[in-house]
Image: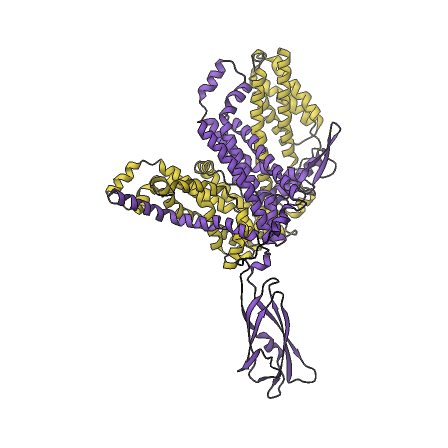
Chain colours: A yellow, B purple
């Protein structure tokens, strides 16, 4: 039992080490280092030996010295004997090894005798592995998008693996792609259009949704249950089936290529979820406040503006942010309704840019950064509001 | 007294909800009915432009006779299907012009030519020619003559409003050779995209539910793919996977894992042999599904995490006392607690993935075996310009969707009954 547990522990930790070093190697390769192989066999032997040695030494040496010794040995063998690599790479490897050895520090021969110890180890390492793996997989495309926008066409073709940014060059050269897309491709105008459309959608949606949500939450009327269930069903209806009829109707009414047309469609598609989110919150506001207001002879308009809105600022802001995000990211309707470059939104403009095979990719990526940054910024800054919005209206997407 | 109060309440409620209801009805419900209507019609993209009478004016001088000029109007009906009724025509000329051969349909008064051409059937074409003579025998300036545009007017039916219907669109959609393939592709895309995003959602939620340094940051990062604009992400992936100079292929080549670049988004099949069995994996479809999972697992993560955090701690403490292993805890406590969320997520994501258009459109445009039903709506309606066919495909989508929804709400209803 003990040997089996020891072997399983060593294997799991070794695989984890291989994974860590491989990610570090990939990142180092992308900084222009020429690393041709992962050396998995050697890593495996090292990892296994370190894991076993850790158990064997146990508590005889202070764990911090133990970590430093292991890391130094590994770096010496890996970075100086096997492959000759620059010092920053080896420092990185040292830190990774140090991290790794402190992580395995909590396992000991005694601990491995315990029941379920292998499962505990597996869970621990899976969590660690998951955190690193998902961070890498998610952040890598964003990292690539960002870096590519600062490169030149030639640099990208000569060595597609070189992700390093040359900060010593002129600022004008560094931000060249951004200058180009704003000057030659009129991105300033598209940002303006996108902002007008998104903010407009938020305002109109709130104007329509707040009274409707109040009515659904508070008032009794014929068709109320029907309305509140149909809100959800309507929300499930996909945009793609609306596209053809709306296209034909908008063509005949001359609403295509206009901001008004987009505003109408965006408002209508976000209204159901806005009403749904708001009415849930309104229901949680104590009724007594309104009863007092009714005694004071306040009209429904007064009740909404003086009581409901001030009390539900958090819910309203989360709806507003959520609607803003949907409108800003929206692509399908802008693809269908806009074919005149003068009325493009940002998303549509980037798609149009990519339609021309000649467009250098760094411009495309610069455009992508421009459309992504505001949303990510808003998301990180207002995360608390947005997460509750996403959870409530999460059907969309 | 009470009655009137209830009445005012009702009235207020209608006033408050009416704008929202009206807008949603006009933009969401009405188009769905309009779709049914259009799907039974033979309409092409060019027909939704209202048919107009058109004239192309060509001015020709006549040799040896400088004081005469020939004006040729190429008249046509812009529509290939519809007739235009009571076409009227008007064009004006310089003052000193005299007409030589007046068509019986026309009048020439005060140097303007007015004609009543009557009805033009579909595809109607006519070369209408007028010869002018200047009264004082002076030379004629062709350019100024050309610069005046004739005005035409006529009445026509809106093709969308007439009552001729056909089943041709549905026949074409349903009995097309590729329809089964189309359904299968859509199903694969939807099913694996949904299952994948839920599996990754469970893994990540379980992960973030532990305590570790940088947990809130991790939660934000995990939601990035879901909140970022699809256009930016799709093009980034396209560059990442590009066979010629994409990062992924370059990396794989660099580490000698592959020998030739793989076109992950442009290759329909890849042959894989496992234990002597040869499989044909749909490569581009798999890649698109991967993108789908990458983009939408954050949603499942968010839902499941919210549920995990609501599980009472006592359950796990009791399990610890009983000496349960981590796996037992996961399968016996965690999983049963989140099945309700998973089943709802599954249905919601299934419906949304089934209708997903942008992701596939931006990544492959529906090429290399990634044509799903929503892509087909676009291709039929806008690439082949057959609006009727596009609508018919939309109707197929709606019918399938209604079937899903029916099951969804029956399932939900059962769950409510149980609790």
Q: Is residue B279 visible?
A: yes
Residue nearest the observer in this picture, B403 or A102: B403
Q: Is residue A161 visible?
A: no
Residue B53, how many percent across, how many down?
57, 68
Choose top left, top right, bottom left or bottom right for residue A145.
Answer: top right
Residue pushed farthest bottom? B136
Residue nearest the observer in this picture, A259 or A83: A259
Residue nearest the observer in this picture, A111 or B60: B60
Total numbered circles:
0
What residue do we see at 65% from left, 29% from top? A22
Residue B299, how many percent across, how many down?
52, 35
| Left or right of A228 in this view: A141 | right
* Image quadrant containing the N terminus of chain A: top right
Residue pushed farthest right? B276
| Left or right of A208 in this view: B226 | right
Choose top left, top right, bottom left or bottom right for residue B184.
Answer: top right
Give the answer, above or below, for where B257 lies relative to B20.
Answer: above
Give the answer, above or below, for where B307 lies relative to B242.
Answer: above
Residue B319, how many percent across, how many down?
49, 16
What residue do we see at 55% from left, 68% from top? B85
Residue nearest the observer in this picture, A245 or B310: A245
| Left or right of B335 in this view: B242 | right
Residue B310, how many percent across, how many down?
45, 26
Give the answer, above or below, for where B296 lies relative to B29.
Answer: above
């Amino acid at each position: 039992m003990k040997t089996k547990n020891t072997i399983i522990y060593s294997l799991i930790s070794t695989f984890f080490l291989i994974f860590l070093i491989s990610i570090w190697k990939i990142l180092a390769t992308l900084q222009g280092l020429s690393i041709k192989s992962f050396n998995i066999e050697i890593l495996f032997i090292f990892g296994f030996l370190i894991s076993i040695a850790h158990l064997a030494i146990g508590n005889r040496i202070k764990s911090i010295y133990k970590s430093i010794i292991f890391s130094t040995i590994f770096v010496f063998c890996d970075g100086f004997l096997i492959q000759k690599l620059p010092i920053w790479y080896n420092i990185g490897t040292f830190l990774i090894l140090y991290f790794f050895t402190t992580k395995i520090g909590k396992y000991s021969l005694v601990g491995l005798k315990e029941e379920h110890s292998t499962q505990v180890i597996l869970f621990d390492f899976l969590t660690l592995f998951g955190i690193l793996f998902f961070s890498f997989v998610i952040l890598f495309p964003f990292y690539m998008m960002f870096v590519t926008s600062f490169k030149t066409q030639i640099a990208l073709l000569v060595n597609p693996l070189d992700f390093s940014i040359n900060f010593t060059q002129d600022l004008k050269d560094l931000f060249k792609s951004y200058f180009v897309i704003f000057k030659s491709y009129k991105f300033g105008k598209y940002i303006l259009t996108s902002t007008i459309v998104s903010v407009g959608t938020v305002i109109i949606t709130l104007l329509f949704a707040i009274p409707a949500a109040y009515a659904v939450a508070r008032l009794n009327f014929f068709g109320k249950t029907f309305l509140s269930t149909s809100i959800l069903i309507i929300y499930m209806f996909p945009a793609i089936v609306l596209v053809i009829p709306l296209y034909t109707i908008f063509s005949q009414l001359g609403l295509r290529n206009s901001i008004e047309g987009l505003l109408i469609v965006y408002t209508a598609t976000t209204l159901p979820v806005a009403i749904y989110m708001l009415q849930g919150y309104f229901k949680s506001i104590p009724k007594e406040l309104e009863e007092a207001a009714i005694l004071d002879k306040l009209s429904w308009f007064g009740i909404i503006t003086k009581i409901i809105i001030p009390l539900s600022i958090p819910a309203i802001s989360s709806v507003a942010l959520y609607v803003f995000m949907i409108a800003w990211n929206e692509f399908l309707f802008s693809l269908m309704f806009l074919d005149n470059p003068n009325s493009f939104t940002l998303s549509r403009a980037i798609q149009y840019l990519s339609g021309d095979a000649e467009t250098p990719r760094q411009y495309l990526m610069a455009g992508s950064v421009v459309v992504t940054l505001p949303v990510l910024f808003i998301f990180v800054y207002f995360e608390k509001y947005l997460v509750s919005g996403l959870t409530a209206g999460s059907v969309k997407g | 007294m009470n009655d009137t109060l209830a009445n005012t309440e009702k009235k207020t409620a209608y006033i408050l909800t009416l704008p929202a209801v009206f807008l949603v009805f006009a933009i969401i419900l009405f188009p769905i009915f309009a779709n049914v209507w259009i799907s039974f019609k033979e309409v092409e993209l060019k027909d939704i432009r209202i048919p107009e009478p058109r004239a192309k004016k060509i001015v020709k001088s006549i040799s040896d006779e400088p004081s005469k000029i020939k004006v040729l109007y190429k008249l046509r009906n812009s529509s290939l299907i519809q007739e235009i009724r009571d076409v009227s025509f008007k064009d004006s000329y310089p003052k000193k012009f005299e007409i030589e051969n007046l068509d019986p349909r026309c009048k020439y008064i005060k140097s303007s030519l007015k004609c009543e051409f009557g009805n033009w059937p579909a595809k109607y074409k006519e070369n209408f020619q007028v010869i002018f003579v200047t009264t004082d025998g002076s030379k004629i300036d062709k350019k100024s003559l050309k610069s005046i545009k004739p005005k035409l007017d006529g009445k026509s039916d809106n093709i969308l409003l007439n009552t001729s219907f056909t089943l041709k669109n549905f026949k074409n959609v349903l009995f097309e050779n590729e329809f089964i393939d189309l359904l299968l592709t859509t199903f694969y895309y939807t099913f694996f995209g949904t299952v994948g995003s839920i599996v990754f959602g469970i893994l990540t939620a379980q992960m973030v539910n532990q305590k570790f340094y940088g947990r809130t940051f991790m939660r934000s990062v995990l939601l990035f793919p879901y909140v970022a604009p699809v256009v930016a992400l799709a093009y980034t992936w396209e560059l990442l996977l590009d066979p010629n100079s994409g990062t992924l292929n370059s990396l794989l080549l660099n580490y000698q894992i592959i020998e030739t670049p793989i076109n992950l988004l442009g290759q329909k099949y890849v042959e894989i042999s496992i234990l002597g069995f040869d499989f044909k994996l749909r490569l581009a479809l798999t890649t698109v599904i991967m993108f789908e999972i990458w983009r939408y697992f954050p949603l499942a993560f968010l839902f499941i995490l919210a549920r995990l955090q609501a599980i009472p701690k006592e359950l796990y403490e009791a399990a610890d006392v009983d000496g349960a292993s981590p796996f037992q805890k996961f399968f016996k406590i965690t999983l049963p607690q989140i099945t309700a969320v998973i089943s709802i997520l599954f249905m919601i994501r299934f419906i949304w993935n089934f209708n997903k258009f942008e992701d596939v459109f931006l990544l492959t445009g529906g090429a290399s075996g990634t044509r799903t039903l929503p892509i087909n709506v676009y291709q039929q309606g806008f690439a082949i310009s057959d609006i009727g066919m596009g609508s018919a495909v939309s109707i197929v989508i709606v019918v399938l969707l209604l079937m899903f929804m029916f099951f969804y709400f029956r399932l939900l209803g059962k769950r409510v009954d149980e609790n």
